[in-house]
Image: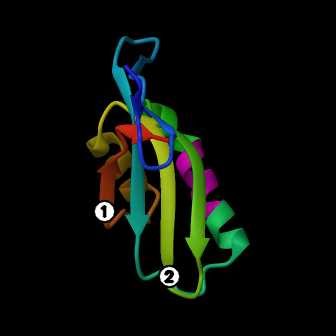
């Protein structure tokens, strides 16, 4: 059921938990990588492509990645059956996540 943020009138909806074809529950996750100071657009794209190449092994769907080269922080949004599935993909591609957060609500 949608909730209303009375402060600004926006509607807040829980993320729907879709199932993949195998029946696994899919949730959204935002993972964070630190210490990537100086990352370029090409390096971010290469890391994202490496994740995309094997994401199916864990039923993960990486949606998008963002980076701040100055601070060295990289964010990745994905749908996955679990945070552990996201963790395993990033570890296998050589850029382990420092944090993985579920994203149960979106506005």
Question: In terms of depth relative to the viewer, which is nearer, 13 or 89?
Answer: 13
Dot 2 falls on a residue whose secondary structure is loop
Task: Tell me if residue 14 can be seen.
Answer: no
The quadrant of the image that shows the N terminus is top left
Question: In terms of depth relative to the viewer, which is nearer, 82 or 57?
Answer: 82
The percent coordinates of residue 43 (x first, y second) are 65, 71
Alpha carbon separation for disc pair 2 and 1: 14 Å
Q: Is residue 20 above or below residue 13?
A: above
Question: In terms of depth relative to the viewer, which is nearer, 71 or 96?
Answer: 71
Magenta stretch secondary structure, dominant? helix
Mark 2 — residue?
Answer: 72
In the image, what residue occupies the spot 31% across and 62% down? 99
In the image, what residue occupies the spot 38% across and 22% down? 17
- Which mark identifies residue 48? none
What colouring method underlies this structural image?
Answer: rainbow
Dot 1 falls on a residue whose secondary structure is strand
Q: Earlier in the sequence, mark 2 or mark 1?
A: 2
The percent coordinates of residue 34 (x first, y second) are 40, 76
The percent coordinates of residue 78 (x first, y second) are 48, 43
Mark 1 — residue?
Answer: 99
Q: Is residue 69 above or below residue 87?
A: below
Question: What is the span of residues highlighted in magenta in the rendered image?
Answer: 46-52
Q: Is residue 14 above or below residue 36?
A: above
In the image, what residue occupies the spot 41% across and 25% down? 2
Label 1 crowd (10 A; few <14 / some 14-19 / many >=20)? few
Residue 65 lies in quadrant: bottom right
Residue 83 lies in quadrant: top left
In the image, what residue occupies the spot 36% across and 62% down? 97
Residue 59 lies in quadrant: top left
Decide whether residue 81 is among the magenta residues.
Answer: no
């Amino acid at each position: 059921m949608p909730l209303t943020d009375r402060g600004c009138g926006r509607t807040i909806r829980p993320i729907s938990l879709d199932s993949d074809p195998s029946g696994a529950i899919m949730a959204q996750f935002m993972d964070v990588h630190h210490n990537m100071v100086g990352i370029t657009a090409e390096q971010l794209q290469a890391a994202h492509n490496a994740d995309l190449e094997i994401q199916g092994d864990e039923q993960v769907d990486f949606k998008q990645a963002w980076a701040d080269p100055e601070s060295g922080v990289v964010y990745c949004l994905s749908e996955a059956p679990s945070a552990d599935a996201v963790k395993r993909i990033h570890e296998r591609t050589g850029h382990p996540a420092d944090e993985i957060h579920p994203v149960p609500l979106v506005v």
